[in-house]
Image: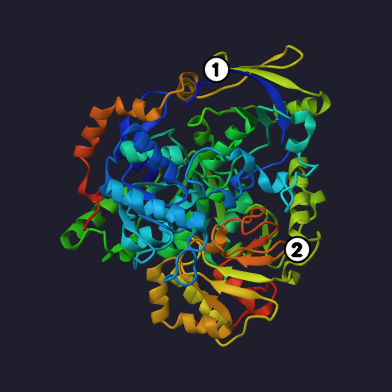
């Protein structure tokens, strides 16, 4: 048999039905549910008198619109409160495991899935959320779906999918100190563009990828969707197994050893062919800062805001001009001269323990600049507890950061955490779209340590020049 | 779902690259638990000023495009979040067909589940349509899904390609859960031989 990619192996082992020139019916191993994209799906089931086929493979939590302030108080926004209440009711009615707001396992789905060991190599995972691509870090084919598809998976545990193409992104060499996984993925998106991965599953490979921790790999795969990809993947290895061992829903003891052998077989084989390939040298990558209103509008921290006239494509030039107007930026401005009002460390991209540890080292013993309001929103209750055990909450609070409860928070501003019009924010999240963090709000995407350093200085700085205790 | 066979309608040109679903339906309107009523919030932050009054310079507020049923757009339309609310809002507002050089994958799939036809044409053709639409008042197109054609006001016919599976779903207004359940035996067979490495271990 010809050498196969990880994706090919997962696909073949999950086909329930296929015909030529048609989408295939694919079995889904895990279905993650949240309050915003599921109510209409459950309503659809009720109207048609259908049940949930595999409630045992379905897991839910509320993350998108939950407040990150005191959890003992009721949710003040009545519509958000209703969505959360409806989710709880639906889970009870259909027998689905639900980590509610009081659960020690509540958190952003793409943080808790891996933490609980729901995410395993070789699985198919779906969720009504585009950042489901995060789980690909474990070598799972994980993708975001719409609400009608959520209903379809609830009813059938299957999904009609056109077979995606495969795109290899090879990242070679080792990165410089101060360069984060976030900088690698932003730099990849800057290179391939927001539609560069459309219709494809990206597999990230190469020395720089194998050197990443699991949490860093999650950051990379998380933003595959920002490159338009159907999913992101990384072949499982010892780093993957080290992370998984001992987690709640992972095989135990002898079963774990057997699983490990099986997972190792899944990795992309030498010589396997991809439909496309892109190569990057990570040693050339500097910390990245977005200047515009798509994640592909990104440059080095040592760079300047570009001139729309420099783009060859007239549609791109128009988009850049519009982005600068929205962002309130002038062409030629040095990135490090951009002053900030807010700093947000959180989201399914960068709210895990390593992100918080790294950021805390930058702010330790320092004070947030007087013009900046800064907050940290841990990705999950488990992350928050671990961080507090390490005393990170104290470090952040002493520096002047707010320390919050877990949730999606200001990544998409569905809860009360939003920017005011024209407020400028350094954010560790994944989208800098117009209005994403609040109408008129201006978002610059950066890594956690870049955000932390910017909070202290009040403007962007090159974190490579900082003396950070390791 | 209402079947989609033919459609004749006014075309509204939205001349922006990478229109994301946060623009199509801003997040403050995602809190409904129904599928209907989203049309009033379509492109809200572009269409309305902060006081909720229509902005004169936004294309959908231009009287020439009143009642438009076809949206002409640029590449990578519908990128970003998976929210199907974006399609619900377009459809509730009155759009039944879209024309663009490319779409984001999740958005594209969501269209077919809601009787909205996303037509892909090459960049040059889309450019030409943009020029024609802005020149001619009440510019209309006649879309025939069965024939996979678009008839222009000058009588010229354009052909578009579409996946035959999704075409059938739209033409017949099929509920794809019903379609899937026709394969129940195969689903059960797959389910019964699931490898232990794919199960949830407690």
Residue found at x 53% / y 37%: B36
Residue A392 seen by the camera: yes
* Pick the front one: A16 or A279: A16
List x then y, in percent, for residue B154.
77, 14
Q: In the displayed structure, would residue B157 be above or below residue B92?
A: above
* Residue furthest to the bottom: A365
Q: Give the quadrant of residue B11.
A: top right
Residue A5 place in picture, x, y as percent: 39, 43
- The answer to the question of whether label 1 and label 2 lie on touching residues, with beta carbons closer than 8 A, is no
Q: Quadrant of the C terminus of chain B?
A: bottom left
In the image as oriented, which residue stretches furthest toward the top?
Answer: B155
Which disc is residue B5 wearing?
A: 1
Picture layout, residue A45 above or below residue A139? above
Chain that bears disc 2: A
Residue A19 placement, left or right of A405: left
For the point 23% across and 28% down, the residue is B185
Q: Is residue A40 left or right of residue A315?
A: left
Image quadrant where residue A390 sits? bottom left
Residue placed furthest toward the left: A254
> Could you tell me which secondary element the residue under label 2 belongs to?
loop
Q: Where is residue A311 in the image (x, y as percent from the top left)?
A: 77, 47
The answer to which of A164 and A86 lies nearer the viewer is A86
* Chain hosting mark 1: B
Task: Please report the residue visible at 31 percent of the width from the left and 62 percent of the height from the top.
Answer: A244
Q: Name the residue under label 2.
A: A304
Which is more toward the observer, A82 or A215? A82
Residue A197, horizontal then vertical, whole percent: 54, 43
- Alpha-carbon span between mark 1 and mark 2: 51 Å
């Amino acid at each position: 048999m010809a050498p196969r990619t990880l994706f090919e192996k997962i696909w073949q082992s999950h086909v329930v039905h296929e015909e030529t020139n048609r989408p295939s019916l694919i079995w889904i191993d895990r279905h993650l549910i949240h309050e915003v994209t599921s109510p209409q799906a459950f309503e659809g089931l009720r109207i048609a008198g259908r049940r949930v086929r595999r409630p045992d493979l379905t897991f839910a939590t509320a993350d998108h619109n939950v407040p990150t302030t005191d959890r003992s108080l009721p949710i003040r926004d009545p519509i958000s409160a209703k969505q959360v209440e409806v989710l709880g009711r639906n889970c009870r009615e259909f027998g689905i495991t639900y980590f509610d707001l009081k659960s020690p396992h509540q958190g952003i789905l793409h943080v808790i899935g891996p933490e609980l060991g729901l995410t395993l190599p070789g699985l198919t995972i779906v969720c009504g959320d585009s950042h489901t691509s995060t789980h690909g870090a474990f070598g799972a084919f994980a993708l975001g779906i719409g609400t009608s598809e959520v209903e379809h998976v609830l009813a059938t545990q299957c999904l009609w999918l056109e077979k995606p193409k495969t795109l290899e992104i090879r990242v070679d060499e080792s990165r410089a100190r101060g360069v984060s996984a976030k900088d690698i993925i932003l730099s990849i998106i800057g290179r391939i563009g927001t539609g560069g991965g459309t219709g494809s599953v990206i597999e990230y490979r190469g020395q720089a990828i194998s050197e990443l921790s699991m949490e860093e790999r999650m950051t990379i795969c998380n933003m595959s969707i920002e490159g338009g990809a159907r999913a992101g993947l990384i072949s499982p290895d010892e780093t993957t197994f080290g992370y998984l061992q001992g987690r709640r829903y992972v095989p135990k003891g002898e079963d774990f050893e057997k699983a490990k052998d099986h997972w190792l077989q899944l990795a992309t084989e030498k010589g396997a062919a991809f439909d496309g390939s892109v190569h990057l040298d990570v040693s050339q990558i500097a910390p990245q800062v977005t200047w515009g209103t798509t994640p592909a509008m990104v440059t080095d921290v040592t760079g300047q805001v570009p001139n729309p006239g420099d783009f060859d494509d007239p549609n791109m030039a128009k988009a850049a001009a519009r982005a600068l107007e929205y962002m309130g930026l002038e062409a030629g401005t040095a990135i490090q001269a951009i002053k900030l009002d807010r700093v947000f460390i959180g989201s399914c991209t960068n709210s895990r323990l390593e992100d918080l540890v790294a950021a805390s080292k930058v702010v330790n013993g320092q004070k947030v600049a007087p013009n900046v309001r800064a907050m940290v929103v841990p990705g999950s209750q488990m992350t928050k507890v671990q961080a507090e055990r390490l005393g990170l909450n104290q470090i952040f609070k002493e520096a002047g950061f707010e320390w919050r409860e877990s949730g999606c928070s200001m990544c998409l501003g569905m809860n009360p955490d939003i920017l005011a019009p024209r407020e400028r924010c350094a954010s560790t999240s994944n989208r800098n779209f117009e209005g994403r963090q609040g109408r008129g709000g201006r978002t610059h995407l950066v890594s956690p340590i870049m955000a932390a350093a910017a909070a202290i200085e009040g403007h962007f700085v090159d974190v490579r020049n900082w003396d950070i205790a390791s | 779902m209402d079947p989609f066979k033919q459609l004749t309608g006014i075309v509204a040109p939205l001349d922006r690259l990478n229109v994301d679903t946060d623009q199509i339906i801003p997040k403050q309107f995602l809190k409904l638990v129904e599928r209907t009523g989203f049309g009033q919030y379509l492109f809200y932050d572009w269409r309305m000023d902060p006081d909720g009054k229509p902005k004169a310079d936004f294309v959908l507020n231009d009287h020439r495009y009143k009642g438009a049923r076809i949206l002409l757009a640029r590449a990578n339309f519908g990128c970003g979040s998976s929210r199907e609310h974006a399609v619900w809002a377009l459809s509730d507002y009155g759009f039944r067909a879209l024309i663009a050089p490319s779409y984001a994958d999740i958005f594209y799939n969501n269209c077919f589940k809601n009787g909205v036809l996303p037509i892909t044409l090459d960049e040059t053709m889309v450019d030409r349509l943009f020029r024609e639409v802005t020149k001619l008042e009440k510019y209309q197109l006649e879309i025939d899904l069965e024939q996979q054609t678009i008839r222009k006001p000058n009588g010229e016919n354009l052909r578009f390609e579409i996946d035959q599976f999704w075409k059938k779903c739209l033409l017949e207004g099929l509920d794809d859960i019903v379609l899937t359940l026709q394969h129940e035996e195969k689903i059960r067979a797959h389910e019964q031989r699931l490898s232990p490495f794919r199960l949830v271990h407690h």
